[in-house]
Image (cartoon, grey):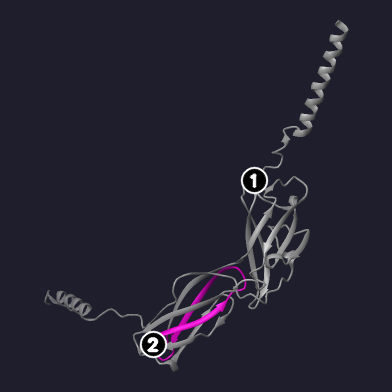
Amino acid sequence: MRHDTPIRIVILLLALAVAVPAVQAALTIDAGGDRTVLAGEPVTILAVCNDTDALDIENMSASIDWGTRTTEPEIVLDDDRNATILDTWTYLAAGTYSVTVEVANNATGTVARDTLNVTVSPKPVEVKVAPQTLNQKSNGAMTIFVSLAEWFGFSDAGNRHATLPDPSAFTIGNATPERVNFCMKDGGTLILKYNRQDLDLAAGDNTLTVTGSLTGENGTIPVAGSGTVSVINPGNGNKGENGDGKEKVKSQHKSGEAEQQSGGKAKGKTQ
């Protein structure tokens, strides 16, 4: 047996590896990067797919799983090996959704998928707070002014058919308003009064976030806004270590008067 036979086989295999190119994926799709939108705004997916085999629109199918439902998007052939997949969806709830775009070449049986994340944030509203200092152990109400002029047709936002389903559903954390009023001045302002002791905010916080919902042309969507507020530690401010600072000052004042009166009487007796 010749000893050079294994060497010849190895050389032949190396030659074949160089001569035959690597097998490429028959079908690929690119749905683009992650997206961030506001609730109620349409999200458009424009995915690009290509195939090493010829594409035939009659033998292609596609779907988009939006995380809430699945749709069958439009497929547009750009040329014999490239196509565009197009569809639009509107989210009415805030959150992060995983979106999967799938395309299949049914003539060859190949399938390609791509996934992206869509983060949906509440629609912003303008919020003002009065007073801007909060001691949660103090009595009384904190008033929140929510501007809704944009929603009721006093701007170019296109929300002219908006309604307010439940004003009392506007919350600050777990706190709900004790009283609700609506003023049409400046286009529409929601006036909410919260019990200060119901507001669970940490000392040092400088913002107060109000969340609620409004119903527009696309359905009921979440809204949120933040106002400036200064939270102080309960017990600080006018309070001393052993009680109310004012009472302590009053006690000291009475004590001083008593000492003066006692000193005056003693002085009179001496004379």
Left or right, 178 with reference to 130? right
Q: Amino acid at mark 2?
A: Asp
Tell me the tag on residue 78. 2
Vertical comparison of 208 with 102: above or below? above
Residue at 67% x, 44% y is 232
Q: Are marks 1 and 2 in contact (CB under 8 Å)?
A: no
Q: Identify the residue under disc 1.
A: 203
Between 68 and 202, the one lying in front of the other is 202
Badge 2 density bin: few <14, some 14–19, many ≥20, Cα 10 Å: few
Q: Describe residue 49's horizontal placement relative to residue 38 as left or right.
A: left
Viewport quadrant of the C terminus:
top right
Question: Residue 222 got which mark?
Answer: none
Q: Main secondary structure of the magenta part?
A: strand
Position in image of residue 180 (x %, y %): 77, 62
Left or right: 247 in relation to 12:
right
> How far from the left and from the top, in percent, is residue 12?
17, 79
Q: Is residue 41 visible?
A: yes
Q: What amino acid is found at the position of numbered circle 1 in the picture?
A: Ala
Q: Residue furthest top?
A: 271
**Residue 146 figure quarter:** bottom right
Asked if 46 appears above or below 133 in the picture, the reply is below
Q: Which residues are magenta?
A: 83-110
User: For residue 270, which quarter of the picture?
Assistant: top right
